[in-house]
Image: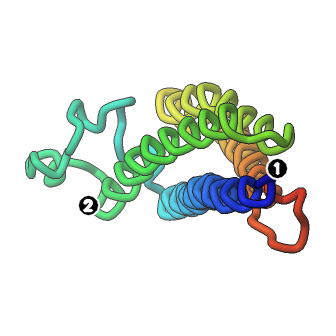
């Protein structure tokens, strides 16, 4: 009887673990892509192509207002890069919060939970630094702090994702 219970529990544990790992993996990749897009935005000189924050030219979607693009000193590509960075940041932020919540309520291993929660706790700091990057006209210490915080978030998400990696080698792997 106990063997049947173990067999029925084990597949459920595997499914729960894989689902968390999938969420954590998507969050990690999304955060990495966000960082690459941020670097690209900076490299093409588009860091101030949306001159206000959190809006872009006072609107959520500047491309719905052709006069904004026509009258801007920045190219459409530059405006799009900055606008896309902000949009992807919002999506990545929601994923980070979701990952932290799922980790907090479903993971037994402290490193998985705590690293995901640490990433989420850094998120408000990162959002403020992103806004200050624009409102303070790319002040180098703020831009550097924005990148450093993003790196800490990426490292925390990497730890949570890697440690939660599904493994069939060890029975303990079902416990994390």
Q: Is residue 4 left or right of residue 70?
A: right
Secondary structure type for disc 2: helix
Count all numbered tags in the image, as a single digit. 2
Q: Nearer the viewer, residue 23 or 123?
A: 23
25 on left or right of 117: left
Residue drawn at the location 76% of the way across and 50% of the way down:
160
Direction from residue 141 to residue 110 in the image, left or right: right
- The residue drawn where x is 55% and y is 59% is 26
Q: Is residue 32 in sight in this rendering?
A: no
Q: Residues within 10 Å of mark 1 (few under 14, many from 20)?
A: some
Q: Position of residue 91 (x, y in %)?
A: 43, 46
Residue sitting at x 38%, y 47%: 87
What residue is shown at x 85% (from left), y 37% (from top)?
Answer: 110
Answer with the quarter of the image where residue 123 lies: top right
| Residue 116 to residue 1: above or below | above
Quadrant holding the N terminus: bottom right
The span from disc 1 to disc 2 (Cα, nearest Å) is: 50 Å
Mark 1 or mark 2, whichever is nearer to me: 1
Q: Nearer the viewer, residue 72 or 130?
A: 130
Do residues under tags 1 and 2 come within 8 Å of each other at their CB atoms? no
* Residue tagged 2: 76
The residue at which mark 1 appears reads as: 175
- Name the foreground residue: 142 vs 113: 113
Q: Residues within 10 Å of mark 2 (few under 14, many from 20)?
A: some
């Amino acid at each position: 009887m106990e063997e049947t219970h173990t067999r029925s529990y084990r597949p459920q544990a595997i499914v729960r673990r894989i689902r968390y790992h999938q969420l954590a993996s998507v969050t990690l990749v999304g955060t990495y892509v966000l960082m690459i897009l941020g670097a690209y935005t900076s490299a093409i000189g588009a860091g101030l192509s949306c001159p206000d924050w959190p809006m872009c030219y006072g609107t959520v979607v500047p491309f719905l207002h052709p006069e904004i693009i026509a009258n801007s000193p920045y190219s459409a590509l530059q405006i799009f890069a900055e606008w896309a960075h902000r949009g992807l940041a919002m999506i990545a932020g929601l994923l980070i919060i979701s990952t932290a919540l799922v980790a907090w309520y479903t993971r037994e291993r402290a490193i998985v939970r705590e690293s995901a929660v640490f990433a989420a706790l850094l998120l408000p700091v990162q959002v403020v630094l992103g806004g200050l990057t624009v409102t303070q006209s790319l002040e180098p210490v703020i831009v550097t702090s924005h990148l450093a915080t993003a790196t800490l978030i990426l490292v925390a998400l990497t730890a949570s994702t890697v440690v939660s990696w599904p493994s069939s080698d060890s029975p303990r792997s079902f416990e994390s």
